[in-house]
Image (cartoon, coloured by chain):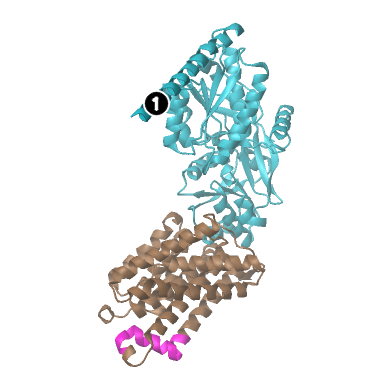
Chain colours: A brown, B cyan
Amino acid sequence: MPILNNLMQQLVNGLALGGIYALIALGYTMVYGIIGMINFAYGEIFMFGAYAGLVLALTNYVNVYTALLGATLITMILGVVIERVAYKPIRRSSRLSALISAIGVSIFLSSFMVRVKGPNTRGFPTLFENRIFEIGNFQITIYQIVIIGVAGLMMLGLHLFVTYTKMGRAMRACAQDKDAASLMGVNIDRVISVTFAIGSGLAGTAGVLAGIYFNAVQPYMGLLAGLKAFAAAVLGGIGSIPGAMIGGIVIGLTEILGITVNLSEYKDAFAFAILILVLLFKPSGIMGRKANKKV
Amino acid sequence: MFIKKSKALVVLSLIMSALILVSGCGASKPAETAPSGGESKEPIKIGFLGAKTGDVAIYGLNTLKGLNMAIEELNKEGVLGRKVELVEEDNAGQKDQAINITNKLISQDKVVAIVGDPTTGITRVAGQIANSKNTVIMSAGSTGTNVVEIGPYVFRDTLLDTIAAPATMKYVIQDKGWKNVALITSKNNDYSVSLSKIFSDAIKSNGGNIVIEEFIQDKDTDFSGQITKIKSANPDVIVFSGYYTEGALIMKKAREVGIKAVMVGGDGLQGDDLMKIGGAAVEGSISYAGFSPEQPTPNTEKFINAFKAKYNNELPDLFAAQGYDALMIIAKAIKEANSADPVKFKDTLAKTKNYDGVSGSITFQESREPIKSPVYLLEVKDGKFALLKKVPVEVK
């Protein structure tokens, strides 16, 4: 029994961690779906969101929701600006240029943060009182509930947005065939801007959640988180929104399970080993479409 | 043509007069010192090796403050009838600069001993040079391995983990009665891995049990997996051998899930960020140190008061105290050996037993590794490090 309780407890831990990865992974997958580019700066947008949340929380003692909302808005704007400055001018050149530009943006953002806020790990102020809920024999902290809840709501909202709104339909059209969508009167530039805004907003939200949950904000926190989220997106099938959610949660759970079986030093390796395994047997990822459909 | 020639003449005459001046000074100097007698009345020179600028400047600057106090004190009476003079150089924490400076101190300034470097890495490099050139070097800060092993001229007067960690565990297990220990190691941190080994042995030899052993990595931020396992093992105390950032995050998470045990660790926990990040979660955390200005012995109190008077009411830290002790202990060896020749006084120095220093009593073992007593246990109290207890260490 204690082992089972422990396992349930660890599943909750894994879900919370996975929720954060899933939110970042959504950004990767959406942008890839629309313009076929890997935006490697997402990890840094995540980091930016965490700092934005930190600054907001420190300035006027706002509550957690205002901090979340503010950080989300700031990162949405940041995402759009990055797209306009660093990606749009080279949209017609080779994919390699866009990739290199993304790496440049990522280095710029983390160095910028080191310059402004210093390289040290910063704690997060307590935005709400911690409470522990006992369910049967295992416990869930309010932080975990908030993270799983907010991540779940965001994903649900995104799903509804993409499926039922006009802009959502335009996004799906662009993902299928950008030129054809353009001929049908879809404003491609606007769709891309909205995609970047939403993706970055999700990463920003994830940043604040991570800041609250881990209580640590650091200029290079985006690097590993971004890599894992990228792995999650590929694992789930890049371009697929439900795939990114599943991929994120799988990576989060694997990491925690690695710790549970006393192999904590390999926890990062586990996430990537699973990625390799899945790709060996299903190259398009768990929820991915057949590779020949997407160039 | 004419103008150029006259210019050349002016320059030439300037050089000539300068030369005369210089040689004049040179000639008059021995004449000045000669009447005061003795051939070796020039000062005994001690070199300072450390950073005055850069990332680790704070260690160097504080060591220097302690050294200057020692110089002032020694020069009241002199050593073997001679003055003691400090030669300071700034290595900025860089190994290549440290090599040049060590060579310069020994060959050009002819120092008999060097105090420094506060860090282990540079002490290893400088120790090689000093040892091969028969010059005593004493680090007032390094605690890593492979320092005194370099050779008979290399010393240090620091509190080693091999002394402090067992003393700390003895206090935790026997005095506090916290027998069930959760041991956490940061796997990608050499310091943490080797310190955990010492902790682990000490826990067993003091009758404690390691009920769970967990591993993290530096820069990790999610510890929920490890903390969940620790909670179910229900330990009396959490022993963490890593640094303050991870320590603070671990304790935050532990308090979040309702673990009441406090954290105990090494001097790696001593950074203000421990409290900045950890807040209330790190209250009561215990770590050891080589010095505390609280509850001083009469000897230490005298030092503290003189230090405060000299440096605008500032309290001396570990480096200042150990820097002061390093020079005083070298001076004592020079006096006892009745010689400022490092070849001779290094042996006297190595025989130092129970020297009553301001940072504690110092004894050099056969290996020249120091035994310091007491070990200062610090506790986080109201967001500050405060002295909890001075644990004496037995010298066999």
Q: Give left or right: position of A27 versus A8.
A: left
Question: Can the viewer see residue B372 in this picture?
Answer: no
| Residue B254 position by quadrant | bottom right
Residue found at x 40% / y 70%: A232
Residue range in magenta is: A160-180
Instruction: Give the percent coordinates (x, y) of residue B325.
Output: 62, 27
Residue lying furthest bottom:
A184
**Labels in figure, total:** 1
Query: Which amino acid lies under the numbered mark 1 shown in the image of this protein?
Result: Ser
Up-down relation of residue A136 to residue B280 (above or below): below
Q: Give left or right: position of B240 versus A44.
A: right
Instruction: Give the percent coordinates (x, y) of residue A126.
Output: 64, 65
Instruction: Provide the major secondary structure of the magenta segment.
Output: helix
Residue found at x 32% / y 65%: A276
Residue found at x 54% / y 10%: B30
Instruction: Give the percent coordinates (x, y) of residue B45.
Output: 54, 21
Quadrant (top left/top right/bottom left/bottom right) for the C terminus of chain A? bottom left
Instruction: Give the percent coordinates (x, y) of residue B232.
Output: 58, 58
